[in-house]
Amino acid sequence: MISNSVSKHILTVGEGYQPPLGGISSVLFTYSKHFADFKFIPTYNLQIGKLSNVFYFLLSILKLTGKLIADREIKVVHIHGAHYGSFYRKYVVFVIAKLFSKKVIYHSHGSDFHIFYDNASGFTRKLITTFFNHMDLVICLSRQWQQFFESNFKIREIVVLENIIDPAELASKKKTSGKLKLLFLGFIGERKGIYDLIEIIKNNKEHFTGKIELTIGGNGETKKLEQLISEGGLADIVHFKGWISGDQKRQLLQESDVYILPSYNEGLPISILEAMSFSMPIISTSVGGISEILSTDKNGYLIKPGDSAALLNSINAFIKNPELIAQMGQQSRAMVTPYYSNSVIPKLESLYERMLSK
């Protein structure tokens, strides 16, 4: 728990986290439980449309300004952000915080930030450069992202802080069928590699029938996914549950054998950490910080994004050798402990104390 003597000086800014509907909001939801005094301004609402969010953001800026005027104890503004529209919103927050002479921490969660930066106009690049070069502290999720920021900007201080989850209360797993139960949780779209996975199952439907079940939970391009399942005749193998959370999510994590996330870009997925905490082996790709938590033949299989043959071989490895599920799952459970709240929160508090002492 971050003590009141520290947390009263911190204002956190990010997307709304009640309910948590994605990676950043899940992190913020977990943080909120470990601050004695969690001062928070939401700048984006995941449950409303883009136009409504314009007005939501304008109202958030008024709330932010009012909070900084009224609460003289606030000394540090901790901004959680990503890329594209999120960056522009957080740039405004950054400017306002600096106008009030606050120290600013930027916590980067953006899986596509390198693409956003590479494709940015000259004007946007200047904004990005100004933003990072004047930031008091940048927090990133992996060493790979740290190298990206250090090579592109003159940042005063940059640190890696692990993404955060609370430890799972793990009961013994019970096999309810002889099938290999695969689980995918996340945004339904090309970036997460879900269509690659569906294509592999469709092309090997006869082989997989009776051997695997894939459960998918998430939001995004849901109609396209449902169409692919229907047109491919995959309803007996692939089950789409829509967005899942709470007890339903915990039950799926408890019942599933292998977590699969063949993404093309990532920060450090909360969903992988959660699956590891439920003693699940992982099949995923060497993007973002995933290679720092996944090692081939240790707690799963790390493949190149878009490598359909490797994805197929990884699934088949668990079909042919089901004993690997428990063996690799135990390794996952052991490897995820540095990401538990009881490890991450003291590190975060130490960063705050250092900012407050300057």
Image: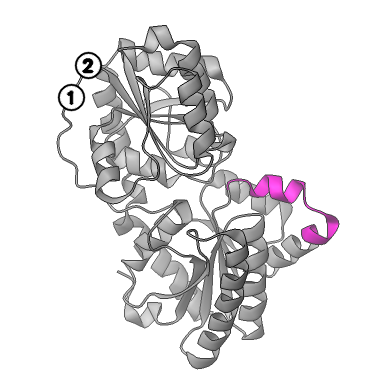
Decide whether residue 248 is among the magenta residues: no
Position of residue 92 measured from the top left corner of the image (x, y, whole percent): 66, 72
Q: Residue at x 29, y 42 (%)?
A: 277
Cβ atoms at labels 2 and 1 below 8 Å apart? yes
- Give residue 55's mark: none
Q: Residue at x 33, y 38 (%)?
A: 276
Q: For this view, does 174 lie left or right of residue 98?
A: left
Foreground residue among 261 and 233: 233
Q: Mark 2 points at which residue?
A: 178
* Tally of marks: 2
Q: Which element carries disc 1, helix, strand or loop?
A: loop
Can see residue 285? no
Q: Which element carries disc 2, helix, strand or loop?
A: loop
Which region shows up in magenta?
Answer: 111-125
Type of amino acid at the residue the image marks with label 1: Lys
Q: Residue at x 40, y 41 (%)?
A: 242
Position of residue 181 measured from the top left corner of the image (x, y, whole percent): 30, 25
Point out the image quarter for the C terminus.
Answer: bottom right
- Judge whether 86 appears above or below 306 on screen: below
Can see residue 297? yes
Q: Residue furthest top?
A: 206
Position of residue 215 measured from the top left corner of the image (x, y, whole percent): 36, 31
Foreground residue among 86 and 265: 86
Please name the predominant secondary structure of the magenta segment in the image: helix
Q: Residue at x 49, y 58 (%)?
A: 46
Position of residue 323 measured from the top left corner of the image (x, y, whole percent): 24, 17
Foreground residue among 48 and 174: 48
Q: Name the residue under label 1.
A: 175
Type of amino acid at the residue the image marks with label 2: Gly
